[in-house]
Amino acid sequence: MHYTERGKTWSVAAIATLIGGACVAAFWIIYFTSGATLGHGDPVVTAFEGAFLIADGMFAALLIAAGIGLLRRRPAGALLLAAAAGMSLYLALLDVTFYARQGHYAAVTAGALFELLVNGLCLGGGLLGLRLAWRLWPGRRP
């Protein structure tokens, strides 16, 4: 990878992780301030979502720290990106497994579409994040 391409990759990865961290934080702000459970009236689903608060907080913190590290071209940026990407995949797989077992995806509803969107972003973002972290890993030859 040419030096200018690598610099562009750092910038794109930084912006994407900062946006991702802001989206995770926004989700929880909306979740707690809307007075609703984002389309879920099922207490089992509400309890499941509530269990993600601390994990998602750590996920958002990793994304933001990775974004800052990548913006500053710090070697830790790639490490933090890899950690956030792995966490993204893990949390998405938990979500997909739960909602699939609950039959939540069986009917095309706004709630199901929203969950599919979130799950798709987490799975795709996690895979892309791991790829970018590998490309940006300190000491790795382009």
Image: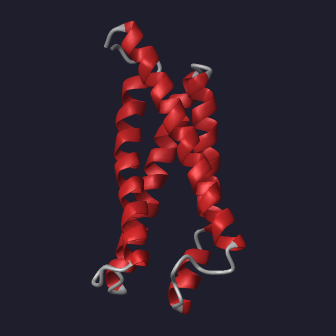
Q: From where the camera sits, is residue 119 visible?
A: yes
Quarter of the picture holding the C terminus:
top left
- 65, above or below 52, in the image: above
Q: From where the camera sits, is residue 137 visible?
A: no
Q: Position of residue 19 (x, y in %)?
A: 55, 43
Q: Is 105 placed left or right of 87 in the picture?
A: left
Q: Tell me what residue is drawn at x 42 percent, y 55 percent.
A: 122
Q: Is 31 placed left or right of 80 in the picture?
A: right
Q: Is 34 placed left or right of 3 in the picture?
A: right
Q: Tell me what residue is drawn at x 64 percent, y 71 percent.
A: 31
Choose top left, top right, bottom left or bottom right for residue 35. bottom right
- 76, above or below 86, in the image: above
Q: Position of residue 45 (x, y in %)?
A: 51, 84
The residue lying toward the viewer, choosing from 57 and 115, is: 115
Q: Tell me what residue is drawn at x 40 percent, y 54 percent.
A: 121
Q: Position of residue 27 (x, y in %)?
A: 59, 62
Q: Tell me what residue is drawn at x 56 percent, y 29 percent.
A: 77
- 88, above or below 72, in the image: below
Q: Is 90 placed left or right of 73 in the picture?
A: left
Quarter of the picture holding the N terminus:
top left
Q: How has the structure been colored for display?
A: secondary structure
